Amino acid sequence: MDFINGLVVLMNFVLIPATAYGAQLALGALGVTLIYGILRFSNFAHGDTMAFGTMITVLVTWWLQSMGISFGPLPTALLALPFGIAATATLLLLTDRGVYQFYRTQKAKPVILVIVSMGVMFVMNGVVRIIIGVDDQRFSDGERFIFAVREFKAATGLREGMALKTTQGITVITALIVVIALFWFLNKTRTGKSMRAYADNEDLALLSGINPERVVAVTWIIVAALATIAGVLYGLDKSFKPFTYFQLLLPIFASAIVGGLGSPLGAIAGGFVVAYSEVTITYAWKKVLKYWMPEALEPSTLMQLLSTEYKFAVSFMILIVVLLFKPTGLFKGKAY
Amino acid sequence: MDQTRNILYFVGIAALIIITGMVQSWNSALLILNMGLISAVMALGVNLQWGFAGLFNVGVMGFVALGGLAAVLVSTDPVSEAWNAGGLRILFALAVGVGIIGATIIAYRRITATRPRVIAMVTILGLGFFLYRALLDPAVQAVEAVNPALQGNLGGLDLPIILAWPVGGLFAAGAAWIIGKAALGLRSDYLAIATLGISEIIIAILKNEDWLARGVKNVIGLDRPVPKEIDLQESAEFIERASGLGLDPVTASALFVKLNYALLFSVVLIILLIMAQLSLKSPWGRMMRAIRDNETAAAAMGKNVTNRHLQIFILGSAICGIAGAMMTTLDGQLTPGSYQPLRFTFLIWVMVIVGGSGNNFGAVLGGFLIWFLWVQVEPMSQYLVTLLTAGMAEDNAVRLHMMESVAYMRLLTMGLVLLLVLRFSPRGLIPEK
């Protein structure tokens, strides 16, 4: 019984939140990795792209709410999501036209594009803050829990409880759908195949009549969708604050690099590696070990390896270890 | 021809600051000048890395913050009670921590077979971590319990704060050595992410390790290398001189103090600028640019590319550390919560790119110009919004929202400036020769 109680605590405080967080990171990292693969630069504006998409979704959500439209037990934000994606895709395509395209035709070095993306980051940062401000915005509604702690305890008769938030369930399911759709698209459709061909060998792809501008445009649209979905899921799960999204850049890049930059499968694996290590290392294990250890060995301290403020340090450590020992990442990315 | 244009640029900046003095106040003009000098130093450091060597460092904020930490550790009074409570134990724990990492590295080097190597490293690190925490945690608790409302930290060495400037440089150099060892030699994007990460970690440490510099409780009232306003206002001689210039003592003292700072900062900037110019024109500088332009060719000529990169990475970061210590000295306080990457990393990058990467004078110019814009865009857009919304009612929602968002106009402006310069004048205002 003690073992199961411990397991429930572990599920509630580590596994469930880390899985949701991992799914959000994976979606973010997929966007970064796609841009890296097709456009060949690290996009520093990705965090702010997520913030922009989420902001539009939040605004549309508020509008829908004021019209009295809701999505039953599900958050209204899911209804607003397509609007967010459309707006972000428009923004990214316009940015590409106005900014990135010039450097692409010049065949500028990747690092120049990174600096350019820094400029885009500044602009998006400013735009988001001008429109919605810097404060925390909560926009989740509908049912809060799929099952709550009390219901779980009543149903199982265990001492410890476990809750599953609606947002966590939605996050995992949505991420699953998105990933399946993305892989189907990349592997089965003509456009997807041309994207992979372009990523593999640009010259050969051009030679076989693939239109590069079309590939790039499709990439930006997919990235817009991925970034907005990741941002909205993160915002539903926690809350929307522009600065937090900027800070997400680090774990997202860590995920993409750990998985292997340019490899979509790697981005997903990397997202979960980073999320699980972040949560397990900053979790106070005392409550779990209380059940799992014999009484004599019961820990006297919190058994927390690092305080939660150091969660960035965790993604960073993983990043450094991977860079030192396996610079191509877990799934042979195309970098290096 | 180029020479005259460059001089005109600097005259233009001087004119901008003087206009600020006449239109707004001399106080804010001197504030801009002082922070402009500090920004110019930071830009010099980044230019050394990016302009000379093509190293992509986006961890400037971390090095600047380390400089700030140096200011606290050098100048504040030691808290003897805290030292008695656990100061030496903390130092011992840190030494043990370093020893553990050293042991891990030795294990990595000595053991060649993969599996024993991994097992040894994981064991040393795992056990070592618990040992380290067991030593550190009680000591930290003891130190932080000492008079937490005012102290709770170990304090510093009670030395003149001006010594903190070189020390800040050393701190930053040390951090740069560690990060450079790990991430240099990899792709430029990787170095970027690694430096971004280390800067966030440095800020996290400053925020959370209260025993070091009080964390988010901030250290205020640092010593100053220049006289205090209040002392000046009480000195009869100063009041007399001020009235001779037709100024009231309060304004005069504020201006006098800021001028002193400006003088000190100018000395640092000029020394660093001369050194940077000399090194740029030296064989060393030419080698650096050769490496930047073609690493393979430089390596074929027998240049050790990784070591040279490490060298210039440390030098550039040290300059950022010096600037950070200067800034904390000017502020008179260390507030870890105020370090934001947009302001302390990416803004410096805008300065270097706009000024002209690879050219020291360009970096200095960019430092002044961008800092001026960063400060002045807000009042300018405030003015613009007031004009635009003049016809609206005072409590009009649109007007209120626009007034609120004026503060973020500068982010937008900086981004646009960067993008425009990259597009139409990618080599910056004063291009590399």
Image (cartoon, coloured by chain):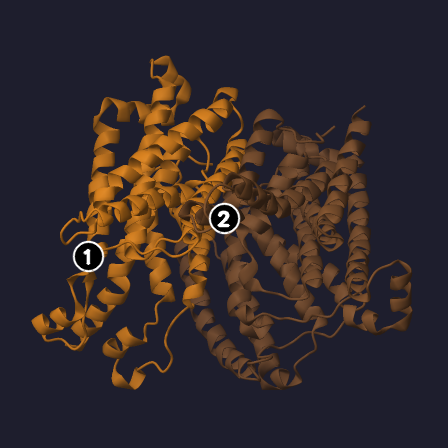
- The residue drawn where x is 57% and y is 79% is B152
Q: Which residue occupies the foreground of this view, B322 or A295?
A: B322
Q: Could you say which quadrant of the image residue B424 lies in?
A: top right
Which residue is the site of mark 2?
B403
Direction from residue A204 to residue B305 in the image, left or right: right
Q: Position of residue B310 (x, y in %)?
A: 64, 46
In this structure image, what is the colour of chain B? brown
What element does badge 2 sit on? helix
Report, in whole angstroms, how far the alpha carbon at label 1 lies from the one at label 2.
38 Å
Is residue B57 visible in the rendered image? The answer is no
Q: Which subunit holds the residue at mark 2?
A: B
Q: Are marks 1 and 2 on the same chain?
A: no
Identify the mark at residue A166; answer none if there is no mark: 1
Identify the mark at residue B138; answer none if there is no mark: none
Q: Amino acid at mark 2?
A: Met
- The residue drawn where x is 82% and y is 28% is B4
Q: Is the N terminus of chain A in the top left, top right, bottom left or bottom right quadrant?
A: bottom left
Q: Position of residue B375 (x, y in %)?
A: 63, 48
Q: Amino acid at mark 1?
A: Thr
Q: Is residue B332 above or below residue B178?
A: below
Q: Which residue occupies the foreground of this view, B147 or A242?
A: A242
In this structure image, what is the colour of chain A? orange
How many neighbours does mark 2 have within 10 angstroms: few (below 14), some (14-19), or many (20 or more)? some
How many neighbours does mark 1 have within 10 angstroms: few (below 14), some (14-19), or many (20 or more)? many
Q: Position of residue A173 (x, y in %)?
A: 19, 48
Q: Could you say which quadrant of the image residue A260 lies in?
A: top left
Is residue A123 visible in the rendered image? The answer is yes
Q: Which residue occupies the foreground of this view, B187 or A17?
A: A17
Direction from residue B173 to residue B216 in the image, left or right: left
